[in-house]
Amino acid sequence: MPYFIDNHELNGDTQTKTIAEKHLKDIKVQHLYHCRKLGYWFDEKRKVAFCLFEAPNRSCIEQLHRQEHANIPNHIIEVDSRIIDFFLKQVETKSQSEKVDIESVSTHPLATIMVLSIDSNDLYNLKTAERRALLKAFRKLVVDHCNHFKGNIILRDQYASQLTFDTASAAVLCALKIHKEFSPFLKNLQQKIFLKIGISGCFLKNISTIEFEQSVKLAKRLCYIAASQILATLEVRNLFQSESMKVVIKGDRIKSVSPDDVRFITQLMDYMEKHWENHNLHASMLEHHMGCSKSQIYRKMKTLTNQSPNSFIKTYRLNRAKQMLRNKSGNISEIAFDTGFSSPSYFSKCFQKEYGITPSDFQMVLAEA
């Protein structure tokens, strides 16, 4: 894909804070114009900002510019790799007068939330010693790398952790590091156990409590539907690429979730949280709520969750039941009915098929932990 440099003449406010906020704004909407912003550099002497883009053509960048910076004169030129090499060297210059540091923008303009979990279906089939060793290794990696990348642990239990970071780069690099170093522990086990990670962010000047909680909820939901990958919102992925231009992510360890998919996931999970206890909940109700045909919602859910609508409903209920068993929120029969199953025997059958262990044996495993 061609590369372009878009230079802006900044005759007005050229403060570091303002320029970085404009950069964040571009990152947030660039997918709408099929562009990818690779970096930016400010020449303080000439009052000119240079932005490096990857885009299908010049027109895509012009559309982005008209929408976001219509009042700022600009000029777009296509460049070759030699120009890009020069540009990257300029971006890496340590001088604050030449480089705009995104971390210096006001107080926490971006909060990036990461949720990790190893609460996989086969975890409870491990021997007690193996499971304890795995949980210990998981906790140590999370704490060590969270500290290394200057993150904060906001919630943690044996099976999952929630972390916050001040930049997308710190969150993604931390996730990649944990994912890589935890893989050898999993490969030595016969069971299929995965480390699941979801990452979202608040791209706001002043993050309110409600908005922060919504971002945490989204990260938890991405973690929930992730398999063995790192699921990140497209905004976080784009911002990471912009901040860490020379970091190459090998393989498919990170998968981006588009804004449209985020909206679908949010709508789906909001509905499930309200109606999962309904004994009559079935796929047709999801179709009606989501405004999708049977084939549309099936394709969408298979793509995002690798499950059919009915399988997703059953798995969601079983996951809730597992949490209730952990929290000792009733006996097995009560939990079976509370989670929408028609009988305790059918609940036990489904639970064993999903987790490879009966609810009663699961309670014994919890007692050993």
Image (cartoon, grey):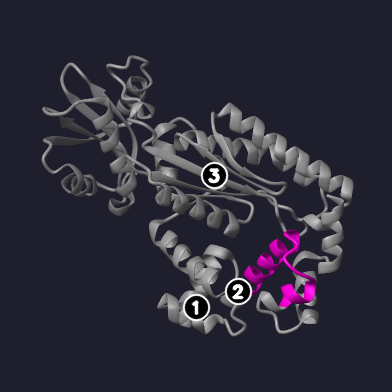
Q: Residue 108's quadrant in the figure?
A: top left
* Disc assigned to residue 114: 3
Residue that carries the numbered disc 2 in the rendered image: 313
Q: Secondary structure at mark 3?
A: strand
- Counting from the top left corner in percent of width and height, residue 268 is at 49, 69
> From what the image shows, is residue 210 above or below residue 93?
below
- Counting from the top left corner in percent of width and height, residue 189 is at 82, 49
161, 257: nearer the viewer = 161
327, 205: nearer the viewer = 327
Q: Earlier in the sequence, mark 1 or mark 3?
A: 3
Q: Amino acid at mark 1?
A: Leu
Q: Are marks 1 and 2 in contact (CB under 8 Å)?
A: yes
38, 143: nearer the viewer = 143
> From what the image shows, is residue 351 above or below residue 162?
below
Q: Earlier in the sequence, mark 3 or mark 2?
A: 3
> From what the image shows, is residue 50 above or below residue 57?
above
Q: Residue 202's quadrant in the figure?
A: top left
Q: Secondary structure at mark 1?
A: helix
- Label 2: how many Cα within 10 Å (few below 14, some 14–19, many 20+): some
> From what the image shows, is residue 84 above or below residue 361?
above
Q: CA distance from mark 1 to mark 2?
A: 10 Å
* Magenta stretch holds residue 321: yes
Q: Residue at x 60, y 29 (%)?
A: 147
Q: Earlier in the sequence, mark 1 or mark 2?
A: 1
* Disc assigned to residue 286: 1
- Label 3: how many Cα within 10 Å (few below 14, some 14–19, many 20+): many
Q: Residue at x 36, y 31 (%)?
A: 107
Q: Amino acid at mark 3?
A: Met
Residue interval drawn in magenta:
314-336
| Position of the N terminus by quadrant | top left
Instruction: Look at the magenta stretch and give its main secondary structure.
Output: helix
